Amino acid sequence: MFRFFRKNKPLSDSAGHDFVAQEPATITSAEPESFEPSDPSDPPELANPLVAETLGASQPPPVSWVGRLTQGLSRTGRNIGGLFSGGIVDESLYEDLESALIMADAGVSASQSLIQALRKQVRQQNLSEPQAVRQALVGVVSQHLSVLEKPFDVGEAKPLVVMIAGVNGAGKTTSIGKLSRALRTQGASVLLAAGDTFRAAAREQLIEWGQRNNVAVIAQDGGDPAAVAFDAVTAGRARAVDVVMIDTAGRLPTQLNLMAELKKIRRVINKADACAPHEVLLVVDGNTGQNALTQIKAFDEAIGLTGLIVTKLDGTAKGGVLAALASGGQGCRPVPVYWIGVGEQIEDLQPFVAQEFAQAMVQSSIP
């Protein structure tokens, strides 16, 4: 078994594994001779307009990951961090901090819990300087979010079957492409399934990602997405790949017929492999705020989520919704957050680390 971390060493048990799909008709493959992990600083290839649009045409500035995350959550960071510019730690500061957390989508319950924990720590450590209280808040938020932090175990099964869902526009297909590159760089072999058979652009986009990452893609023009998922799991077992990722059609949780189809896809995957799917992920747009909790709860009840990918934390996203999730806001189970995304570049999707996220929310430091 090996785990997916941001700063992993190369994995000897699967490094160098080459996979070229040769299944008939329904499988599209880049047919690579070999895979060479690219330097994360390399600019994206822009020959294809789909890839260019997805990855962006300019090379990112040399800013650290925590720096990019801090920039993405700058709206919340300014609102919270700015409260520590004064020289007094008093009741007014606590009230303003609670209001800022609520405005950041943390919700009333989580905000009150965080401030209560902060008060306790300030008393216990006899803190009087605003910057010391600020660092204490980072620790409190980090501890609160730690329930969501969990490494992604790739070696749990072979193949590890990952079913991925999400509403339209959340960045689901793009996230799958980025994860494919990250997993391949870590040494894992990957097979993709274009289960979004209703949107032609989704299949084309996934195929482009497959070609870019030297990963085979199972795709059909129209047809039953459950059948595509079944074929992918079967092919993954036959080829002994490490990870099979299945893209599904974007849908709103209120579309009951489409949610029922998700359940069907899950059942069919289980017929292909009695232990699958091993992971059921939901891609959530970080800009949706508290509405994300409604999505998480609905999808969890329908297909039993094992993890989340939170995207688009690079604009107006406030980020506090993760604090609400950690405290079970709106009856939501605290589903682990495997990855968060702050931009369009491949390296802008990284494993969730509670301490880093807390620093960005409070803007305790900007590397």
Image (spheres, helix red, strand yellow):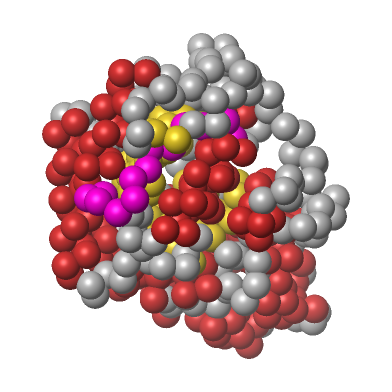
Q: Quadrant of the C terminus?
A: bottom right
Q: Is residue 292 left or right of residue 124?
A: left
Camera-nearest residue between 318 and 116 = 318
The image shows residue 67, relative to residue 73, as above or below, that is: above
Outermost residue on the bottom side: it is 92
Q: Quadrant of the N terminus?
A: top left
Residue 222 is covered by the magenta coloring = yes
Outermost residue on the top side: it is 13
Q: Position of residue 124 (x, y in %)?
A: 58, 60
Residue at 45%, 35% in the rendered image? 28
Is residue 210 at least partly visible in the picture? yes
Residue 9 is covered by the magenta coloring = no
Residue at 23%, 72% in the rendered image? 255
Q: Which residues are magenta?
A: 213-225
Residue at 54%, 83% in the rendered image? 103
Outermost residue on the front side: it is 25
Q: Is residue 93 left or right of residue 297?
A: right
The image shows residue 146, relative to residue 101, as above or below, that is: above
Instruction: Name the main secondary structure of what is drawn in magenta.
Output: loop
Q: Is residue 8 left or right of residue 297?
A: right
Q: Position of residue 7 (x, y in %)?
A: 65, 32
